Image (spheres, rainbow, N blue to C red):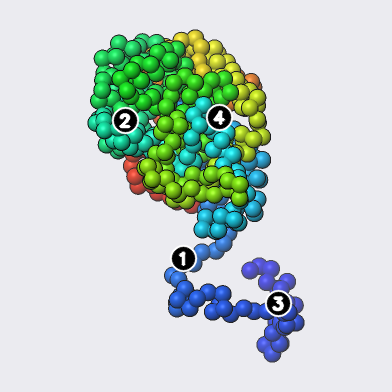
Amino acid sequence: MRNIRALQPLFDLAKPGRRATRFPKSDVPEVPLTKLLPATAIAEQPPALPELAEPDVVRHFTNLSTLNMSVDTHFYPLGSCTMKHNPKRNERLASLPGMLDLHPYQPEETLQGMLALLYELQQMLGEIGGLPAVSLQPAAGAQGEFTSLLIASAYFRERGENRTKVLAPDSAHGTNPASAAVAGFTAVTVKSTPQGFVDLADLAAKLDHETAVFMITNPNTLGMFEPNIKRIAEMVHAVGGLLYLDGANMNAILGITRPGDFGADMMHFNCHKTFSGPHGSGGPGAGPIAVTSVLAPYLPAPLVVREDAGYRLDYDRPKSVGRVRSFFGNVGILVRAYCYIRSHGPDGLRRVSENAVLNANYLLARVKHIFPVPQGDRCMHEFVASAAKLKTDKDISAMDIAKRLLDYGFHAPTVYFPPIVREAMMIEPTETESKETLDAFAETLFRITEEPAELLHEAPHTTSISRPDEVRAARQPVMISPPPGSP
Ligand SMILES: *Cc1c(COP(=O)(O)O)cnc(C)c1O
């Protein structure tokens, strides 16, 4: 208020009696609300919204968004999750009004462009997987697994076979046994060999005429391509079972080999891992499935079909397991997958996989003298290193390293998965990372192993919170940003 005298001329102008500001009358007609909305849709009282200043709201959400790491802000070698390159071009294309301003209840004649896109995506995924019949409906890999197991159920029911078991290796992602249980099967675990491959003797012992499906991830969660895959497919088929390919690791084999060619009957794709859909914290995803022509009749309805008159949604599928998600699936992510696949083309997709494999092998070669990789000297798009020796020698755990990496501006790798490797660190570099970034990450790992264990036990030191109770944080998230002025 010290400068109030400087404002005096303004106050003089604002003396009572001055007339209020007037604007010329607008030519833009005012439309009463009752003309825009049916009377039943108009609230009698304004809703009780919290009264906040706009800058406070904008700051709240902007600050919240910076508390997290993402592929746009940090190197993010989160194994299994495949933090894929997210081309900005995809975002522009998916935001075009022709993509965004559609409603799924529009008449099909007015959705022809989108239906063409979805139809072509079905075709291209069928070609990539070597399995001709595709449904885009499942919203995630896990839902693709579940849907495929429903298809297996329907298939065996129609054949009059009562098959109750679904097998998966002990290296499988937790969603495999979970999907089996939710679909009504008993989940049975098959052992891995010390090299990380399916133990064929154990598989043979567990396969029988009650086996509906063997679920295999190939390349597996250790980042290794299963060399016995054809033999495994034969063993499963010999007892009348189906082979399911968990396609979460398709990023490593695009255009190089196809699940349908190595014996799979059904599979899912994770568009958010393989075809560049941005993801994090559990969403958003798309988990299309592809199956053999024998299993095609059971796919969820509707499918997009092409006829002389144009594209149409086909609901007339009497053997279908039904709908697993509203409308046509998670279309926003499917559009990004389409743009990614089309813009790379078949040769480009193969190069994507080659780069993913090259980057992972480069990092493996750089770190293995300090972090042994129990399953070998070569990997596909990811590898699982072990901090077990560091734990014994220096009391430094995989968790300590993961937490300390945050202080250096790197997202942590996946730790303690798969559970068959002690002090597991599952490292998967994005396929588009530069050599400089990979080197900086490797050198930071080495540096951390030289730091005092006590410092590491308390890490991270630079983040707004340190080591939360992760289970409670997931169940009871506290969604507030730090108050202004706090460190
Ligand atoms: C990520 C993943 C899944 C589950 O996929 P979501 O899309 O996250 O549901 C299944 N299996 C493996 C091997 C995975 O990495």
Q: CA distance from mark 3 to mark 1?
A: 31 Å
**Residue visible at 39% across and 35% down in the picture:** 148
The x and y percentages for residue 59 are 56, 54
Q: Residue furthest bottom?
A: 17
Q: Hey, what amino acid is under mark 3?
A: Val
**Lower position in the chain sequence, tag 4 or tag 3:** 3
**Lower position in the chain sequence, tag 3 or tag 1:** 3
Q: Which residue is mark 3?
A: 28
Q: Which residue is mark 2?
A: 177
Q: CA distance from mark 1 to mark 4?
A: 52 Å
**Lower position in the chain sequence, tag 2 or tag 3:** 3
Residue 361 circle label:
none
Q: Taking the image as drawn, is residue 441 in sight?
A: no
The x and y percentages for residue 376 are 46, 10
Give the side of residue 140 with respect to residue 5, left or right: left
Q: Is residue 328 above or below residue 195?
A: below
Which tag is nearer the camera, tag 1 or tag 4? 4
Residue 127 circle label:
4
Q: Residue furthest front?
A: 308
Say what secondary structure mark 3 lies in: loop
Q: Label 4: how many residues lie within 10 Å, few (<14), some (14-19) or many (20+)?
A: some
Say what secondary structure mark 4 lies in: helix
Which tag is nearer the camera, tag 2 or tag 3? 2
Q: Is residue 440 above or below residue 73?
A: above
**Residue visible at 39% across and 10% down in the picture:** 195
Say what secondary structure mark 1 lies in: loop
Q: Is residue 39 above or below residue 326?
A: below
Residue 50 circle label:
1
